[in-house]
Image (cartoon, rainbow, N blue to C red):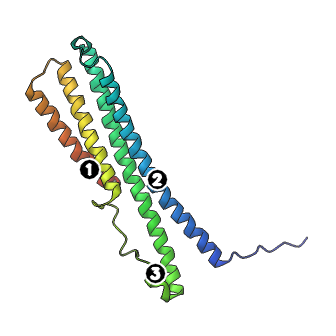
Amino acid sequence: MQKQKSQPIATDQFLTEEYEYIAQTAAQANEDRARVSSFYLIAVGSLIAAIFGTQFFDADFFTRGVKFIFSGIFLLLTLMGTSTIVQLARLRAAWHESMLAMNQLKEFMISQNKDISKAFRWTSRTLPPKYKKASISFYQAREAAILSGVTFTASVYFAEYALGMNSWVNWLIAAACGIVVIFLQIVIYKRALN
């Protein structure tokens, strides 16, 4: 029996398919970033709405156990914020990797036809960096970091409150801890990009 030869794939068709795949992965990374940050915003907002919808203003509601529970819930939201920050960083890195792949493909196309080089704005040299403070990804990460700082402030405050410490100094300590968490979250974002 005679073997059939496989038909060669047309180079143009192959390059088009590769380009579409790369474009699709970049778009998917952008969509996922929006979903991740929205999920965290909704989670935090829902919890705060639920807390205000309870017996929040009833002094008897805040037993020591309830205060510790609130502290734990807000700590969990802070950890979810950290997870959100890391996911946003990894999705930004995935988008950047897609852009590098697309630029490699463009460079190949330019090597075959020098005239098309003027059609492309981004090259491997001019591609925006992964860590760019003026990017939507960074703004989303900063938003999640601020929310994490707020939730950590609430966690520290409720823990202090449960331990019988309830003065303006405790608010100050809790706020300082929240500010530290905001800056730590941004550092985590930057490191997760590498």
How far separated are the C-alphas under marks 1 and 2? 21 Å
In the image, is residue 110 above or below residue 72?
A: below
**Relative to residue 41, is residue 167 drawn left or right?**
left
Q: Mark 1 points at which residue?
A: 186
Q: Residue 14: horizontal and vertical position, in percent?
A: 63, 73
The front one of 138 and 48 is 48
Residue under label 2, please give it.
31
Which residue: 23% across, 44% down?
182
13 lies left or right of 60: right
Name the mark nearer the viewer: 1 or 2: 2
Residue to which mark 3 is pinned: 119
Amino acid marked by disc 2 = Glu
Residue furthest to the top in view is: 60
Counting residues from the start of the chain, the first of labels 3 and 1 encountered is 3
Residue 78: % across, % down? 30, 36
Q: Three-letter amino acid code at disc 3? A: Ala
Direction right: furthest residue: 1
Q: How many labels does the image show?
A: 3
The first of marks 1 and 2 along the sequence is: 2
